[in-house]
Amino acid sequence: MKYKQNNISPKVTFKSNKGIIKQSQFLFSDLKVLALDDNKLNLKYYGNLFKNVFLFSEPSMAIREIKKNDYDIIILEYFFQKCTGLDILNEIQKEKTNKELVSLLITNSNLGISYGALNSFTSYLFKPVAPREIYDEINLIL
């Protein structure tokens, strides 16, 4: 299913910590997204990019949530203290065998990640990543 980039929800206004008011438009407002990252700042970033996003910093909690509900796209970090994004993806795929899983890996570096592991994900990007890059990548894979 292609999500049209002109399917934009109304502008959302929020204040930064310096009191500056910013306006942001959500692209893909009908997309249900789950983001898993152990960095709270990254989660906040994803929260500002999508209208319907569920944020998790703990892999086990995210896996339980994914087993219970369907998501249009899952955004994963690769490196966690006790596991990798590939471990998480494999665990999810065990449960979701009848549904296509669209996974986007966004990580700091490809160091320590095999080419085979990268190709297990639907797509991947390396940080730093601009919102436009994320939106463009999602548009390509959906």
Image (cartoon, helix red, strand yellow):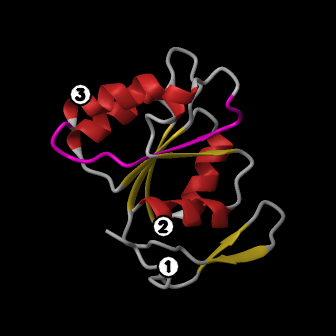
Residue 112 to residue 118: above or below: above
- Disc 2 and disc 3 in contact, CB within 8 angstroms: no
Please name the residue shown 48% across and 36% down the image: 119
In the picture, which quadrant includes the C terminus? bottom left
Left or right side of 116 for 93:
left
Gap between marks 1 and 2, in whole Å? 8 Å
How far across and down, in percent of the image, does residue 34 sit?
Answer: 42, 48
Spatial separation of the CA atoms under disc 2 and disc 3: 26 Å
Q: Residue 68 in the image: x percent, y percent? A: 21, 41
Cα separation between marks 1 and 3: 32 Å
- Horizontally, residue 120 falls left or right of residue 42, namely left
Disc on the earlier residue, 2 or 3: 3
Q: Secondary structure at mark 3?
A: helix
Residue type, label 2: Asn
Question: How many numbered marks does the figure carry?
Answer: 3
User: Is 18 contained in the magenta span?
Assistant: no
* Within-10-Å neighbours for mark 1: few <14, some 14–19, many 20+: few
| Residue at the extreme front of the image, as rendered | 115
Q: Are marks 1 and 2 in contact (CB under 8 Å)?
A: yes
Residue 32 vs residue 136: left or right? left
Point out the stretch of residues depicted in magenta.
97-110
Say which amino acid is labelled 3.
Lys
Badge 2: few (under 14), some or many (20 or more) residues near its Cα, within 10 Å? some
Q: Secondary structure at mark 1?
A: loop
Q: x and y percent of residue 26 in the render?
A: 53, 73
Mark 1 or mark 3: name the one nearer the start of the chain.
1
Going from N to C along the chain, the mark reached first, 1 or 2, is 1
- The residue where tag 3 is placed is 94
Q: From what the image shows, is residue 72 above or below residue 117?
A: below
Q: Which residue is mark 2?
A: 139
Q: Which residue carries the number 1 mark?
A: 5
